[in-house]
Amino acid sequence: MNAALRIVLLGTLFVGAPLASGTASGLAFVALACAAATLVEGRPGPIPIIAGSLGALAAALLGPDAPLLAGAVACAGCWAPRAVRAVERRDRRVLVGLSLLGGALAAMTAQRFGGDASGAVRLAAVAVCGLLASLGGLVSVDESVAARLRWTVLPRREPVDEALARAVTLRRGVVASEPARHLDAATAERLERAWGDLADLAGALAASRERGPAPGWMTARVEAHVEALERAHRTLADHLARSVRIADRGLDEVELTRETLEEEVRALDEVAAEASRNVPEISLR
């Protein structure tokens, strides 16, 4: 659903670009670019809006003299937030290159067919331009666990989907975070194992939901696992903050000792052990 909507938005952006000559149409063009950048990123926020706006404004300035370059810049603006999030530098470069290439090709297609009087041809031009501008989607910017979790989140937005969406955001933030770089090998291994267990459990949940409503005990396990990971990483961040003596009244009220950290990691082990069983009558208390 998101991919189809992304294609439609990007295609409309390029086919409608020649019409963005007045103030109202220009603002609509910028708004459409922001919406496309937000959809590409997968979550709303200031960065997609800023990137989409800058790309659209730059494209508007370049458009009359260099339409292909304008299309490349507009498309790159939509994909920039996703490129910044890429874990590997190589993936970031490939995504930027594909977005520039796809934008230029989409602009060329829109210039050739977007102004056709036939409605069918225009609709086809929107589809083709959207597909070309979506070439950046061929590059996965998430590391393996975040990618596995992302595909288990359904757009129906049930509580378990909210929990999985939080887990994806958390995973993206902690992969290269400061606390993660200060973990000892044993703790890092246990945390990574807990993340892998969550991905496995989420995959089982997704498979179950394809056959019908998932059992309540399974969704409850996923939500409990996500909450345990959130507590563990929050404890890690607080532990690091105290170790470097950051002044914070809230931290002064919390006793963050090595034992506290061990308790959270042990709790993760317990949740992971429960998730590996197939007994529906498990108690989550």
Image: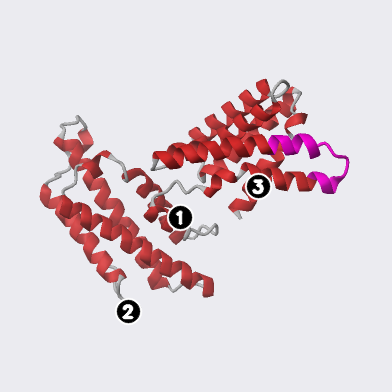
* Disc 3: which residue: 131
Residue 108 in which image quadrant: top right
Judge depth for marks 3 and 2 and give the one in front. Answer: 3
* Disc 2: which residue: 279
The percent position of residue 284, horizontal first and vertical second, equals 29, 68
Judge depth for marks 1 and 2 and give the one in front. Answer: 1
Q: Is residue 235 left or right of residue 221?
A: left
The one of 285 and 104 positioned closer to us in this rendering: 104
Q: Which residues lie in the magenta part? A: 106-122
Q: Amino acid at mark 1?
A: Arg
Tags 3 and 2 touching, CB below 8 Å = no
Q: Is residue 178 magenta?
A: no
Quarter of the image where the N terminus is located = bottom right
At numbered mark 1, what does the secondary structure look like: helix, strand or loop? helix
* Disc 1: which residue: 150
CA distance for labels 3 and 1: 22 Å
